[in-house]
Amino acid sequence: GLGLAVVLILVVVVVAAAKSNAPNNNSSLKSIGRAIDVSLAPRKYQFIGQGRLQAGSGDTLLIGNLPVVVSTKTQFAGSIQPGEMVSLSGSIVANQSGLVDRIEPVSASDTYFIFAGPLDSTSDTVWKVGGISILINPDTAIDPGLNLQDMLLVTFNVQDDGTWLASTI
């Protein structure tokens, strides 16, 4: 009866307040297209990294060529502006986007991302780690003795064409 109605009203008010208080730190960013809501997508593997905040649209940001998604649960440690270097942590979700748990400005200048996943397959130019294709080249430092299904820590950069190039595995 009345108790259930009060609970429902409180839930609506809390949800509305959370949405209205969500950070909107990307309003002056160059648009990169329609935002895709992946906040409820299954999370695969954790990632960390840092890069320059390049563009954004809705809940999607482009950081160091990596498209990432922020949600109402993303923690912003300070204000971020286009062109600034930021560090971030979060999860890689099923569509190979990054769902950001925390983002903050940093004074560093190098761009990199790191994630862990099992080694699925290898070839001369592409390794699949945790279901994600990672390019390798002669400059990629690869630990010897790795086997299929070993958990790997991959450090990579995102190329201009969107491919991920490993610097170390």
Image (cartoon, rainbow, N blue to C red):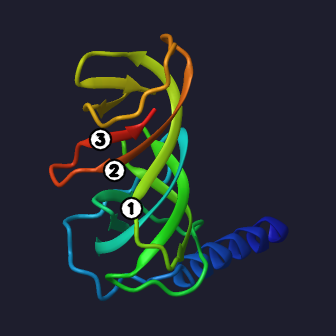
Q: Position of residue 53 (x, y in %)?
A: 35, 74
Furthest-right residue in this view:
3
Q: Amino acid at mark 3?
A: Leu
Vertical position of residue 89 compared to residue 32: above or below: above
Report the residue at 23% width, 24% height from top.
125
Q: Mark 3 and mark 1 in contact? Answer it, CB < 8 Å.
A: no
Q: Mark 2 and mark 3 in contact? Answer it, CB < 8 Å.
A: yes
Q: Nearest the camera: 149 or 32?
A: 149
Considering the numbered disc 2 on the image, is that residue within a helix, a strand or a loop? strand
Q: Amino acid at mark 1?
A: Thr
Q: Mark 3 and mark 1: span between their CA atoms?
A: 12 Å
Considering the numbered disc 3 on the image, is that residue within a helix, a strand or a loop? strand
The residue that label 2 is drawn on is: 157
Q: Is 164 placed left or right of 49 in the picture?
A: left
Query: How dense is the environment of label 2, judged by Cα within 10 Å: few (below 14), some, or many (20 and up)?
Result: many
Q: Mark 2 and mark 1 in contact? Answer it, CB < 8 Å.
A: yes
Considering the numbered disc 1 on the image, is that residue within a helix, a strand or a loop? loop
Tell which circle, 3 or 1, labels the residue nearer the N-terminal end: 1
The residue that label 3 is drawn on is: 165
Report the residue at 81% width, 71% height from top.
2
Tell which circle, 2 or 3, labels the residue nearer the N-terminal end: 2
Q: Is 132 placed left or right of 101 in the picture?
A: left
The residue that label 1 is drawn on is: 111
